[in-house]
Image: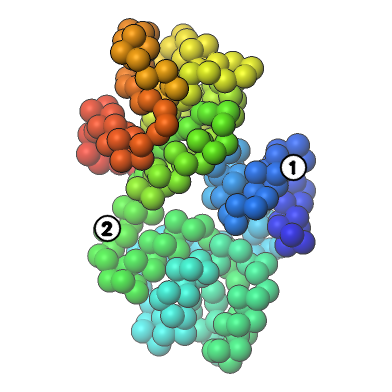
Amino acid sequence: MQKRKRFGEILVEAKVVSEEVLNRALERQRGTGRRLGQVLEHMGVVTEKDIAAALARQFGFKTVANIARANFPAEVLALVEADAAMSKLVFPLKQEGNSLYLAMVNPLDIEVIDNLSFKSRLRIIPCVTTPTEIQAAVNRHYYHKDAEQAGQEADNWWTILVVDDQELVRSAVVAALKREGYLLLEAENGADGVKLTVQQKPHLIISDTVMPRMDGYEMFRALQSNVQTRHIPVIALSSKSSAEEEAKLLDMGYYDFVAKPINPIRLIARVKHVLKRNYGDTPPPR
């Protein structure tokens, strides 16, 4: 918890997030096993680039980008095993004398630094980058996907906003979609859903219909009245599985309808169908 709190304080000091947002994120993080950065990304308040920039600025680390497209000698890659690079989100950049420059998502992870220093007998010099950058670099240089494919994985993605006040339902939907490679944003009610949509412009919204503060119907009408958001397709989630409820939602302008309890296979199929119909087969550039 100490490391997580310290990281959160860094983001607050760098004015990346407010203390209120940090406290909400820490509450959501508790017991999930997720990194604080992941929770903040899912809330839609920061991007992975924001986090990398804040760490670099606060501690004077250098940042690195486009590492999937660069070339690295085999002896440098051999200093870190492929599985360790992917699981720890690190990537060896270059060796200079007794020093190893290492791209890291969390340059404050002393345990990882000490372990790699012990194994390589080198002094580790951290450089900050994003999870997407490292995943693409590992895919190309360790798993031998071509540079174009690795670059696409780093630069392309679909963004989906999930709005539901029931955390178990929301988490289940997010987990199912994340396994498909989508970037997920989360909101607990319609008011937050509208705010995130305006800020982040997701490609698709999946929203419950019954929620506190602003329900799904009110949120949908608010989005439809805004010229900047009315084009974004919305899939409705509802515990009312009747034909009448489905007809009502489709008549309102919802793109599709999925009844609760959620069947992940059905949901993923509907999501893929909506994205393909609205945007085609190729994910948009970052």
| Residue at 60% in and 52% down | 32
Q: Secondary structure at mark 2?
A: helix
Up/down of 76 relative to 212, above or below: below
In this view, the residue in front, 107 or 210, is 210
Q: Which mark is residue 89?
A: none
Colour scheme shown: rainbow
Q: Which amino acid type is marked by label 1?
A: Asn
Up/down of 205 relative to 9, above or below: above
| Residue at 64% in and 59% down | 56
The residue tagged 1 is 23
| Residue at 67% in and 50% down | 30
In this view, the residue in front, 152 or 239, is 239
| Residue at 52% in and 69% down | 88
The mark lying in front, picked from 1 and 2, is 1
Q: CA distance from mark 1 to mark 2?
A: 38 Å
* Position of residue 135 measured from the top left corner of the image (x, y, whole percent): 42, 62
Q: Quadrant of residue 256?
A: top left
* Position of residue 152 measured from the top left corner of the image (x, y, whole percent): 31, 52
* Position of residue 150 measured from the top left corner of the image (x, y, whole percent): 32, 60
**Residue 220 in view in this figure:** yes
Give the side of residue 7 with respect to residue 199, left or right.
right
In this view, the residue in front, 178 or 78, is 178
* Quarter that holds the C terminus: top left
Binning the other alpha carbons within 10 Å of mark 1 as few (below 14), some (14 to 19) or many (20 upward) gives few
The residue tagged 2 is 149
* Quarter that holds the N terminus: bottom right
Up/down of 65 relative to 51, above or below: below
* Position of residue 238 measured from the top left corner of the image (x, y, whole percent): 43, 21
Quick one: label 1 or label 2, which is nearer the N terminus? 1
Q: Which amino acid type is marked by label 2?
A: Gln
Q: Secondary structure at mark 1?
A: helix
